[in-house]
């Protein structure tokens, strides 16, 4: 399982979300606290954020802890909508920058924690990589994000051993599913964080139960059952 984090709220720096917290994605890359599958996340990382309506990404196939540049640039990257991830590659999957989340269709940024049998997904010409997560992302984009709950349920029925924790955002909306791994929410005065695991020990973090969908908009956070 990889670890991901999403932010929707006032503009904040990428470094305040992933590098500075005591247990942020940087620390989760070598010492995650809640990871059930895999010990660390050394197979790449990605930071995506919205600059107006445009999704921008910086992805790598190397460990986040060894990156020579992100710490210098991340304080200057400010956005009201961020999707970031660190990766633990599933056995047999390629390790390349294009296999690191977030994936995009030009409007949304999507990360996947988990694994899915690629044989249950339609063949896609728009997948960015042959990694299962990229093919799943292409499928979800094709079905449309308004149908995320149905897409996850249908793929989960086709592959009962799949783990399908999705995190996806478009600048004004952030959606996440919990299907086989952990997800926590932190409501801050300046916005909302969704994360595979809390980035610190603040008492306001809440765990989302398995098989649920979370939707975050300016109107607030809505949690609904998936199964
Ligand atoms: N299956 C995906 C990959 O190989 C995601 C892995 C994960 O969540 N650890 O990249």
Image (spheres, rainbow, N blue to C red):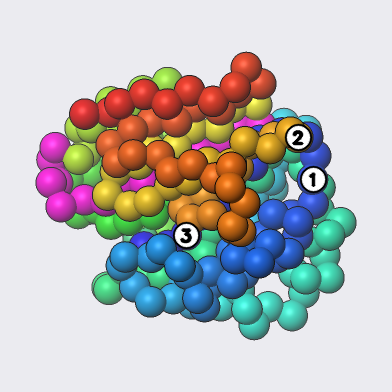
Foreground pick, 189 / 42: 189
- Residue 3, numbered circle: 3
What residue is disc 2 on? 190
Q: Looking at the image, which residue is at 21% across and 39% down?
A: 155
Give the farthest residue toward the right.
Answer: 76
Are discs 1 and 2 less than 8 Å apart at CB? Answer: yes
Q: Quadrant of ligand 1?
A: bottom left
Is residue 78 at least partly visible in the picture? yes
What's drawn in magenta, residue-wise? 157-171
Per the model, the C-alpha gap separating discs 1 and 3 is: 20 Å
Disc 3 residue crowd, few under 14, some 14–19, many 20+, Cα 10 Å: many
Q: Say what secondary structure mark 3 lies in.
A: strand
What residue is disc 1 on? 12
* Of the two numbered discs 3 and 2 in the rendering, the one whose residue sits closer to the viewer: 2
Q: Looking at the image, which residue is at 21% across and 50% down?
A: 162
Q: Judge from the rendering whether residue 201 lies leftward or rightward of residue 94; answer left or right.
A: right
Quadrant the C terminus occupies: top left
Place of residue 37 in the rendered image (x, y in percent of width and height, measured from the top left): 30, 67
Place of residue 182 in the rendered image (x, y in percent of width and height, measured from the top left): 38, 51
Quadrant the N terminus occupies: bottom left
Disc 1 residue crowd, few under 14, some 14–19, many 20+, Cα 10 Å: many
Q: Earlier in the sequence, mark 1 or mark 2?
A: 1
Q: Earlier in the sequence, mark 1 or mark 3?
A: 3
Q: Is residue 17 above or below residue 153?
A: below
Residue 166 painted magenta: yes
């Amino acid at each position: 399982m990889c670890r991901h984090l999403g932010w929707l709220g006032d503009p904040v720096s990428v470094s305040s979300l992933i590098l500075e917290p005591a247990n942020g994605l940087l620390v989760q890359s070598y010492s995650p606290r809640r990871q059930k599958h895999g010990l660390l996340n050394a197979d790449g990382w990605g930071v995506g954020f919205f600059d107006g309506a445009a999704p921008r990404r910086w992805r790598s196939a190397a460990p986040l802890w060894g990156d020579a540049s992100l710490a210098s640039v991340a304080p200057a990257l400010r956005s009201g909508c961020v999707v970031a991830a660190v990766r633990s590659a599933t056995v047999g999957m390629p390790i390349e920058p294009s296999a690191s989340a977030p994936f995009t269709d030009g409007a949304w940024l999507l990360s996947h924690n988990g694994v899915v049998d690629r044989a249950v997904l339609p063949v896609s010409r728009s997948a960015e990589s042959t990694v299962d997560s990229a093919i799943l992302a292409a499928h979800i984009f094709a079905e449309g994000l308004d149908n995320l709950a149905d897409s996850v349920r249908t793929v989960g029925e086709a592959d009962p051993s799949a783990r399908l924790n999705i995190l996806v955002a478009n600048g004004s909306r952030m959606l996440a599913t919990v299907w086989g791994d952990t997800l926590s929410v932190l409501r801050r005065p300046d916005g909302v964080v969704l994360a595979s695991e809390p980035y610190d020990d603040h008492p306001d973090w809440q765990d989302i139960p398995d098989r649920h969908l979370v939707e975050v908009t300016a109107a607030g956070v809505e949690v609904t059952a998936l199964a």
